[in-house]
Amino acid sequence: MDPSRRALLAGTGAALSGLAGCTALPPNPLTAKTLSVPEGSDVWPMRRFDVRRTNVNSDAPGPGREPSVVQTYYASRPVVVGSDGEVRWRDASGDRRPASVVTDEFLLRGRSKMEVAATTHGGEDAWTLNFPTVESDGATWNGRPEWLTPVGDRLYAIDGNRTVFGGVPGGRPRWHAKTDPVHGRSDHGLAVAGETLVASGTESYRPSGTRGEGRFHHTSLVGVGLDGERRWTFETTGYPWTVATDDRRAFVPVSTGEWKSGEERLLANHLFVVDTRTGDARARRPLNVGWNRGMALFHAAVVVCGTEAIICLERDSLEERWRVPVDDSDGVVGGGGVVFAGSNRGVRALSLEDGSERWRFDSDESRNEPVAVAGANVYVSATDVVYALGPK
């Protein structure tokens, strides 16, 4: 494998978590580099399948010519691959749903009972951090890390009951803050916006006395200070596919639907922009893209992909730049002025400027989700494999 390539973290199922929508962060004591997008390193975070993801590296260029598959990683379990293409460490724990983050020095993994373990890239155990298991309605069954986010000299986590934890990596827990417990099927995310942690979750509920008919989803974002103080709550009907943040805003595309005649029908789709200092909605824009399937946050633009269209908006005004119709979508990432969109047919590279197609890669995989851009390569998650697209 070309030494210019960086490393790859691949997971199984919907389990891997990377850094959630982070902009530039203070240095972490575990590494000498910023953890949002480590530069000059041979590892970086990425995500897989329906775990939330945002643009991983907005400055990295994509393939300038027609791409081909230059490397395939069989990723039935988490694996760390070096820039030389050699497998450095493979997860043999049998845990099928780890919450993981890769830093320059360690692979951080969430285990059961709120334990976070650090492993070197050579596979050696480094340290563990045990957060307290917090009850929700008298139960602790959801008490395991769902998301890990290192910030400065702290490590933050969120569990299945949407309790946010803060502690010192390699040290001891400092605090935990309970947010609104979520019942039923839940999705969780933990993003950083300035001095605020933004925790997200979705509750699936039904009106009393009903079964599948009339089922709804309810989404809430909770702002928690880096000291553990709960600051605000933002709630809306529907559920998000992606939450991305900058220093003062959270971008949340929300699909609203209801169950009728055995299927879920889309009612509305909006992009909310939430002030992360107060929790107030600063903007609410309709999205005509079908069901949300992903979002990429660029310096001056927001790209949202759905089951019917991909739309590019100005980041500040939310005015539409362009819209490209699609009939399937598996996710989107961006880099170097290029939007990489996946579907059940393959991957397309679209110009961020006008949405025109630069190239297309056809794939036989039933799912093709672009998850990361590094150098000249685009890494795409498919069924049990991750493959790298590079120039021919």
Image (tube, helix red, strand yellow):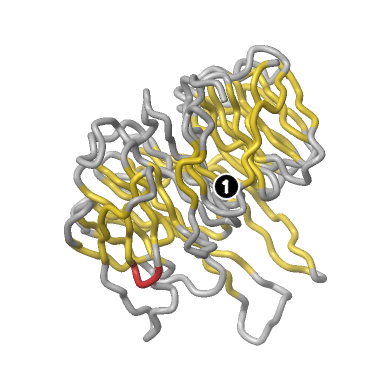
As shown in the figure, which amino acid type bears the numbered disc 1?
Arg
Q: Quadrant of the C terminus?
A: top right
Residue 90, how many percent across, how many down?
49, 50
Which residue is labeled 1 in the image? 48
Residue 313 position within the rendered picture, expressed as x and y whole percent measured from the top left: 57, 28
Residue 364 seen in this snapshot: yes
Residue at x 24% of width, y 43% of height? 195
Q: From this viewpoint, is residue 287 visible? A: no
Q: Residue furthest top?
A: 64
Q: Give the answer, above or below, for where 328 lies relative to 340.
A: below
- How many numbered marks appear? 1
The front one of 175 and 371 is 371
Q: Viewed as shown, does residue 297 lie left or right of 171?
A: right
Identify which residue is drawn at 17% across, 57% down.
Answer: 171
Residue 180 x %, y %: 38, 69
Query: Foreground: 15 or 79?
Result: 79
Q: Residue at x 62, y 67 (%)?
A: 216
How many residues crowd mark 1 within 10 Å: few (<14), some (14–19), many (20+)?
many
Point out the image quarter for the N terminus.
top right
Answer with the quarter of the image where residue 343 lies: top right
